[in-house]
Image (spheres, helix red, strand yellow):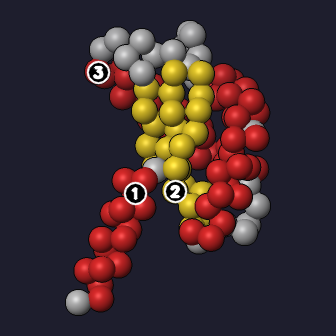
Amino acid sequence: MSEYRTDKITNHIKELSANFIEHEAGPTSLITVTRVLLSADGKNATVMISVLPREKEQAAYGFVRRNLGELRKYVTKGLKVHPIPFLSVEIDEGEKNRQKIDELLMQK
């Protein structure tokens, strides 16, 4: 798969995932789709999320995991590629580390 096609697919999955989560999630936490990792063969995609406040992270992660089937249906309607990648979700640890560094820098 070409790099241009991969970027286009990952960006579209990111947008669709963010829209789905925005409409389905409750107002108790802010769930942000930070990036999407697509496998080389295009059959698997990992949606990376970050959650604020951090105390709600596990609840938000559980919500997204429980709704992966609905998310995949939503992505299928908006994404015109075949096959539609199998979706999984993970907490973006890189984003959490970046936020921690920002907090430490603000203390100085």
Location of mark 3 (residue): 3
Q: Residues within 10 Å of mark 1 (few under 14, many from 20)?
A: some
Give the mark nearer the N terminus: 2 vs 1: 2
Distance in Å between CA atoms under marks 3 and 1? 24 Å
Location of mark 1 (residue): 95
Location of mark 2 (residue): 50
Label 3 SS: helix
Q: Which image quadrant for residue 74?
A: top right
Kind of residue at disc 2: Ser
Give the mark nearer the N terminus: 3 vs 1: 3
Kind of residue at disc 3: Glu
Q: Is disc 3 in contact with disc 1, using a CB cutoff of under 8 Å? A: no
Q: Position of residue 21 (x, y in %)?
A: 67, 48
Residue pictured at 34% horizontal, 11% vertical? 1
Q: Is disc 2 in contact with disc 1, using a CB cutoff of under 8 Å? A: yes
Residue 85 visible somewhere in the drawing: yes
22 relative position to 83: left or right: right
In which quadrant will I find the C terminus?
Answer: bottom left
